Structures are given as C-alpha cells and as structure tokens.
Image (cartoon, helix red, strand yellow):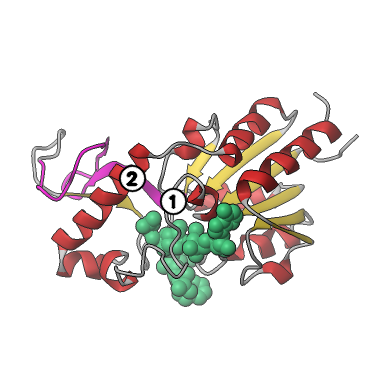
Amino acid sequence: MSSIRNIVILTGAGISAESGLKTFRAEDGLWENHPVEQVATPEGFARDPDLVQRFYDERRANVLAAQPNAAHESLGRLEAEFDGEVLLVTQNIDDLHERGGARNTLHMHGEVLSAWCRACDVRHKWEGTLRDGPDCPACGKASMRPDIVWFGEMPYQMDRIFAAIAQADLFVSIGTSGAVYPAAGFVQEANRAGARTLELNLERSAGSHFFDETRLGPASELVPEWVEELLADSPT
Ligand code: BJW
C-alpha cells in the first residue's frame, strides 16, 4: 500500500488547453497579440485600463463558454476518493477545477470571475464586463479591476502553499512552463521537504531537471492515468 498521505498539485495553463483556453507562451498563445507588459502588469493597467479590461473581459467570456476536460475531472475524483490530503494550487484564473469537482483549490494568480474594488478592497463574483466601468456593489465607486495577480504583485495564499509543500509526500506539477516565480520554485521547495516530485506536461519545461520523474503527453490522458494509478495503490 502507498505511504503517500499529503499531496500538493500545481497546475498551469496546459491543463485547460484541451478545454479550448489558450496558454501564454505558445506561438499562438495569449501574449502573441497582447504583449505581457501591456496586459499583465499594474503599470500596463495604469497606462491603458481600457485595453486591459477588454483583454480580461474576453478571457472571462471564454472561460464561461469552456467546459472542464478529463484532466480537471480526474483531479476532482482524486480529491473525493483519496484517503489523505490533496491541495490543488492553480496558477489558472479559470474555474474549471471547481467545475471538475475540486473543492480544496487555491488560485494563487487570482480569478477572472472575480472583480476587486480598489476603493473599498471588497471582491465580488463577476461574470459580466468591466470595461464599461461598473460601480462597486459595496461602495458605489467605479474602481473595479480584474482580481488577477500581475507581475510585480504578491501571489495569493503563499503562506498556506509553502506550509502545505513542507508537509507534502508528493508534489505534482501539471501543464506549466516553470517560467514564472514563485510557482516555478515550488518543486525545489518540495525536494527540500523530501517529497517525491512528478511533472506531467506536453513537453519538457524549464524546470524538468528538478523533478524525480517527467511524463510527457496531453493532460487529458496523463492525468486520468496517473490518478487511476494512485487510487489503485491507495485503497480507501
Ligand atoms: C500542456 C498542454 C496539454 C500545453 N497538456 N501540458 C527571478 C526569480 C524570482 C522571481 C522573479 C525573478 N524575476 C522576476 C521575478 C518575479 C516575477 C517572475 O516570475 N518573472 C519571470 C518572468 C521570471 N514574478 C512575479 O512578479 C510574481 N510575484 C512575485 O514574485 O512576488 C514576490 C514574491 C516572491 C516570492 C514569494 C512570494 C512573492 C507574480 C507573478 C504573476 C503572474 N501572472 C500571470 C498573468 C496573470 C494571470 C492571467 O492573466 O491569466 O499568470 S503571468 C502568466 O504566467 C499567468 C500564468 O499563471 C503564469 C504561468 O504560466 P503557465 O501556466 O505556466 O503557462 P505557459 O503558457 O507558460 O505554459 C503552458 C504549459 O502547458 C507549457 O509547459 C506547455 O508545454 C503545457 N501544455 N498544452 C499538458 N494539452
């Protein structure tokens, strides 16, 4: 029987690619027509808020139209059936993990279906547009921005994430290029904590050499196979 009790899973844009949501750094990726410094920095937002709001309005509409794929659903199943702790840390701003059944999920780079009022610091569930400058339902001021962590800003829930990695027996990274910190450094934290480390990705990433094992292929195939394997080895 497996001795794995605590699992931390990190996901990136690759897990949602087969749901039709673009990744960032692919040739036809999200930043192909929208340079990162224009749409993913606080300075870009200050310079041209309309451009940034339009970019995220379109992303929000795409997320609402997308459906979870077999990879999201199998992680939901893992959380429900595994006899131990599973923490899902996602860099993704979509809600496909939740719609795939996951409950214990941290969105370290924020959520596109949330709007953050910079005037009163309250967050609101948001499915509509922001480019038209809606009033905040709490304070009435028109100061809402997407609830997204841009470059130079502090990712969410870092204390909880580092604490979970310190307790992990297994760290699994799925569909992320390992290009953005602090998430790119989690595998080294997990190695220091003595966890086994596994990467599932379409191709080798910047940090592949840090993992004990890398499996290459589409997430919709690799993730269900790995979940099946793990649950077969850890009967409840
Ligand atoms: C498939 C697949 C399929 C495709 N199946 N796989 C040096 C050291 C440390 C830090 C820094 C440094 N220099 C600068 C920094 C800071 C900076 C940073 O990392 N810069 C880098 C450019 C180096 N980081 C920050 O500013 C962060 N804040 C910060 O560091 O605060 C200080 C701090 C330090 C330590 C602790 C705590 C705090 C904030 C980063 C915010 C990132 N925000 C973005 C945009 C907003 C969200 C959005 O618009 O959606 O988040 S950037 C963008 O990249 C987005 C993503 O979440 C993130 C990661 O991208 P991801 O998911 O990996 O996507 P891709 O496209 O890169 O890769 C896709 C992968 O999928 C590929 O590998 C494919 O092979 C694979 N794939 N199809 C399986 N079907």
Residue 80: x and y in percent read 65, 26
Which quarter of the figure has residue 49?
bottom left
Q: State the quadrant of the N terminus.
A: top right
Query: Residue furthest toward the right?
Result: 1
Report whether 170 appears left or right of 158: right
Determine the residue positioned at 49% across, 48% down. Answer: 16
Determine the residue positioned at 78% across, 33% down. Answer: 231
The magenta segment: 108-134
Residue 198: x and y in percent read 73, 55
- Decide: is 119 above or below 74: below
Residue 53 painted magenta:
no
Mark carried by residue 62: 2
Tag 1: residue type?
Tyr
Residue 176 shows in this picture: no
Residue placed under numbered mark 1 in the picture: 156
Q: State the quadrant of the C terminus.
A: top right
Q: Secondary structure at mark 1?
A: loop
**Mark 1 C-beta to ligand 1 under 8 Å:** no
Determine the residue positioned at 18% across, 62% down. Answer: 51
- Decide: is 44 above or below 169: below
Residue 121: x and y in percent read 24, 45
Choose between 26 and 44: the one closer to the eye: 26
